Image (cartoon, helix red, strand yellow):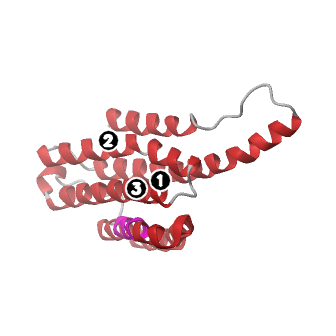
Amino acid sequence: MALSDGVFAIAITLLVLDIQVPQGLDSDGFHEALRDVLPNLGAYAISLAVLAGFWRDHRAIFHRVRLVDADVIWLTVLGLGLAALLPFPTALVSEYGDEPTSVVIYSAAVASLGAVHLALAVVVARRPWLHGDAEPLRNEFLYAVDLGVMVGVFVVTIPLALLVGPAAMWWWLVLVPVKVWLGRKDDAAAK
């Protein structure tokens, strides 16, 4: 878990490195630089939420893991690699958010990370010898639906961005009510 925690922490830290205001600006230049940094802050907030969610979910998956096999190791390394990569597409969206290609690259990265997490969760759930009698922290079915919906939303964004351009990013807001609803279902199932 220490390696995973470290990779997520570094990826989150790297997100903020693109956010800066040059020194020595006059008042007008300072205010213009602040306006110019707003897309970076928006991209940072989205990617922070994405990475924080995947970190939380990664810890929940491994909460019950007692043994690992080659598939778990391979999927974990692939997922950590994708998490470490996320600052790059985040920088693309923050600097070139008006380019559909930036939205496509970001969406593909998040969808890939979600697909790997979904595969990891399925492998752990279907191999009882990996977790013994330990109970999952979340309802496994609802978690799979949550990840599946997220992957679906980001996959749909890819052709949508090619058709309507960067406005396709608004499609990501569909995840807010879905995640709230699934969170309430998960809470109710836990009681």
Whichever of callouts 3 and 1 sits on the residue coming sooner in the sequence is 1
Alpha-carbon span between mark 1 and mark 2: 15 Å
Please count the marks in the image: 3
Q: Quadrant of the C terminus?
A: bottom left
Residue at the spot of label 1: 50
Alpha-carbon span between mark 2 and mark 3: 12 Å
Residue at (40%, 56%) from the top-left corner?
Answer: 110
Element at label 1? helix
* Magenta span contains residue 59: no
Residue 90 appears at what percent x and percent y?
50, 47
Residues in magenta, as a range: 147-157
Q: Quadrant of residue 23?
A: top right
- Looking at the rendered structure, the kind of residue marked 3 is Val
Q: Is residue 174 above or below residue 5?
A: below
Q: Which mark is residue 115?
A: none
Viewed as shown, does residue 130 lie left or right of 59? left
Residue at the spot of label 2: 81
Whichever of callouts 1 and 2 sits on the residue coming sooner in the sequence is 1
Residue at the spot of label 3: 110
Q: Quadrant of the N terminus?
A: top left
